[in-house]
Image (cartoon, rainbow, N blue to C red):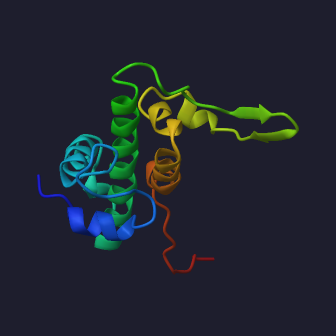
Amino acid sequence: MAYPISIAEFKTYFAKDFIYGSDNNQVSDNDISRAMSEASMNYNEDMFDDEETKKTIFYYLTAFYLVVDIDNASSQGGSGSSGIVSHRRVRNVEESFAVPQWALQNPLFSQFASNGYGRKYLNMIYPYLIGRVGVVPGASLP
């Protein structure tokens, strides 16, 4: 599959999000390539009209898989992630958020709610999932 983005474009788009390099604690080109391959399995470019939208959505889907791969590597395949956290409290500081039910109740979409890139990906594709709406100018007969 020809991806809508390149590794160099990914690095430019997420310049501040990841530390790139060849050390073990840095994101390599191979890591990005693997994440892009994984992302391609859940990507349907035919849903989107223009190239910019296709690219943006693929950026976030790739970043989602990259973070999953990084988390898996850091926990050596164990359960290092705490899953979907909807509420967190440390002393007198508290945060909470709600993942929409349409995402949580869907076996495919619920996995994307586990990190910020996946949640942003879901927000981007949601309008395309509910159908297209268009307005056609015209008039009605009396």
Q: Nearer the viewer, residue 50 or 27?
A: 27
> Which residue lies most toward the front here?
23
In which image quadrant can residue 53 be found? Answer: bottom left
From the viewer's perspective, tell me whether residue 115 is left or right of residue 61: right
Total numbered labels placed on residues in the image = 0
Most foreground residue, 35 or 92? 92
- Residue 75, above or below 126: above
Instruction: Indicate the position of residue 58 as horizontal and vertical percent values.
Output: 32, 56
* Residue that protrudes farthest toward the top in the picture: 78
| Picture coordinates of residue 82, whole percent (x, y) | 55, 25
The image quarter in which residue 69 lies: top left
Q: Position of residue 109 (x, y in %)?
A: 46, 35
Picture coordinates of residue 39 (x, y %)?
28, 45
- Residue displayed at 50% across by 32% down: 110
Name the residue: 51% across, 80% down.
137
For the view shown, which residue lies furthest in the right direction?
A: 92
Residue 50 in view: no
